[in-house]
Amino acid sequence: MKTERRSEASSIWKARIRCPRCASRVVELSTSPHCSNELCEYSSAGFPVIDGQPVLIDFQFSVFNRDMYGAASGSVLRRDVTGRSISSRLHRLTFGNNPVARRNCSLFLSIVKQTATTPTVLVIGGATIGSGADVLYADAAIELVGTDVFSSENTVLVADAHKIPFANDTFDGIWIQAVLEHVLEPATVVAEIHRVLRLSGIVYAETPFMQQVHERAYDFTRFTQSGHRWLFRHFSEISAGPVSGPGVALLWSIRYFVRSLGVGDKLSRLFPLPFFWLRFFDFIGQGRLKADAASGVFFLGRRSERTIAPGEMPKYYDDQR
Ligand SMILES: [Zn+2]
């Protein structure tokens, strides 16, 4: 019964895949994906396929170009998808896990399950499982649609979130963790999230605030808690706050201070290690004192037709006690 329901749900999101240029249907998804609209450039040019997954990117409006998805390269950036590399292990040892995301993930799941029998959840930036997001991937009661700018075993298609290749009102939930700092236009991406969410759909976003540049050429923006709220102004807030606090931010600063002196990217990872205990201070303190110096912030909200007004923002900050 469960298998039948899941395959039924699966066909629903597949039928809602759309051309990122003109929003027409995309046909022959797994063999030679192309736009069904003969007037569209992607009708004749088609989309690349990498590891059996369609790359539904409108290359004219993306920092990623078609050549990056040739047969030899599955990834724009070299990433540790399994989390087993020395760098990933060292990172966990120094910075710990993400208990806030884990808690929020359980809350996200409990809310999204109230919206549909088998809710469909889109993960943007989902090639690597985000810290604390394991339960999202392990939950058999939801239909997970993983996307990213490169393919992995956790994705079903490759997309650029500035143009999410799905029809309006497709998803019950969207998970976007540590992604919005890597996009050129966060507001465009959030407008797309709003568009592809169903009316009562929910979003969970986690974005850095006090973090130095990572992922090299693909790192563009940071957000305060208030800035993050304004970014999601077309959503009603369920919960928001710091992800990791000033302790973790200080550890990042130690690493990047040393790195700036030219010791090299890998070696710089060793320097904050003796100070790992700083992160335990993040369990102390709350409200805006913590948010003002947080390493990252989160927002959990529901799609809304009401937009918060600019005049509401000072009060939003003052209420972070
Ligand atoms: Zn098209």
Image (cartoon, helix red, strand yellow):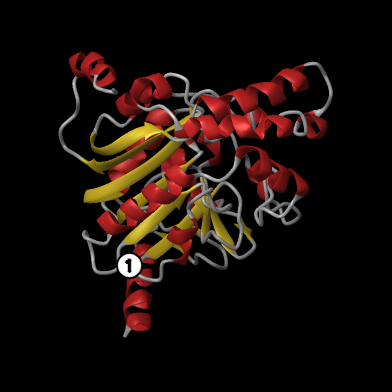
**x then y, percent, for residue 302:** 24, 43
Binning the other alpha carbons within 10 Å of mark 1 as few (below 14), some (14 to 19) or many (20 upward) gives: few
Residue type of the residue flagged with mark 1 = Ile
**Quarter location, residue 206:** top left
**x then y, percent, for residue 258:** 76, 20
Q: How many circles with numbers are drawn on the protein?
A: 1
Name the residue nearer the viewer: 243 or 192: 243
Q: Residue at x 76, y 22 (%)?
A: 259
Q: Is residue 103 left or right of residue 51?
A: left
Q: Residue furthest bottom?
A: 1
Name the residue nearer the viewer: 179 or 72: 179
Where the N terminus falls, by quadrant? bottom left
Name the residue nearer the viewer: 222 or 10: 222
Q: Is residue 100 above or below residue 280?
A: below
**x then y, percent, for residue 283:** 46, 34
Q: Is residue 147 above or below residue 281?
A: below
Q: Is residue 62 left or right of residue 83?
A: left
Q: Residue at x 73, y 32 (%)?
A: 274
**x then y, percent, for residue 209:** 49, 25
Dot 1 falls on a residue whose secondary structure is helix
Whether residue 95 is visible, yes or no, is yes
Where the C terminus falls, by quadrant? top left
Residue wearing tag 1: 12
Q: Residue at x 19, y 25 (%)?
A: 308
Q: Residue at x 33, y 70 (%)?
A: 9
For label 1, being within 8 Å of ligand 1 is answered no
